[in-house]
Amino acid sequence: MMKMRSAVALAMSALLSPLAFADWQIGPGSQVQFVSIKNNTVGEVSHFETLSGSVTDAGDVEVRVVLDSVETNVGIRNERMKTMLFEVGLYPEAVITAQLDAGSIAALSSGGATNVALQIDLHGQSVTKDAQLNVALTEQGVSATTTQPILLTAAEFGLEGGVAALQAVAGLNAISRVIPVTVALQLVPAN
């Protein structure tokens, strides 16, 4: 009986070890979403359609968000956000980086929750935010999602002027300067 348990444990670790020591890339279905609130009463969910990035077996994380791919479900608002807020001609992408510790790398191989310090580079500014991720194994690889929104402010990234310009051109009384952001990454083995 003991030999059988040892054999099962050895087989399981052989199956899981490629997960623990593999490079991952961001796969289809990954999303970065944000909520904007206008006139203190109307919330709108938007997202970015183009993401890329990787997680290495050493725990180096890099996620690139193409700001030109913002999707608000309103064409003119997409264009205004690209030019007036994000200034995609000068700042084409946001870059999120992190260094995973051993516990976080273990969560990638077996699932569970992990805390991560994210460095967010956006609009020429760099800000560090803490995030808690729920990690689960999927048929395709690994799913990593925030368990609660990450709160970003316009002021942290020098976006106050852009928000004010959007508010004026849309004739709004207010646009919230605090934006909740959620992340859902589908990680697949790198080729």
Image (cartoon, rainbow, N blue to C red):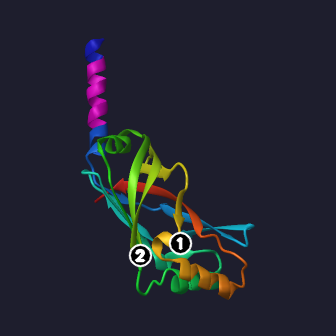
Q: Which residue is mark 2?
A: 93
Viewer-nearest residue: 92 or 184: 92
Q: Is residue 75 visible?
A: no
Tag 1 or tag 2, which sits nearer the N-term? 2
Q: Rate crowding at label 1 as few (under 14), some (14 to 19) or many (20 or more) other CA atoms within 10 Å.
A: some
In the displayed structure, would residue 2 be above or below residue 160? above
Q: Main secondary structure of the magenta part?
A: helix
The amino acid type found where label 2 is placed reads Glu
Start and end of the magenta stretch? 5-15
Furthest residue toward top: 1
Quarter occupied by the C terminus? bottom left
Q: Nearer the viewer, mark 2 or mark 1?
A: 1
Q: Quadrant of residue 39?
A: bottom right
SS under mark 1:
loop
Q: Quadrant of residue 3?
A: top left
* x then y, percent, for residue 88: 45, 83
* x then y, percent, for residue 76: 63, 85
Q: Which residue shows up at 27% across the image and 50% down it?
A: 22
* x then y, percent, for residue 139: 44, 47
In the displayed structure, would residue 180 be above or below residue 58? below
Q: Which residue shows up at 38% across the image and 41% down it?
A: 107
SS under mark 2:
strand
Q: Rate crowding at label 2 as few (under 14), some (14 to 19) or many (20 or more) other CA atoms within 10 Å.
A: many
Q: Is residue 175 visible?
A: yes
Magenta stretch holds residue 13: yes
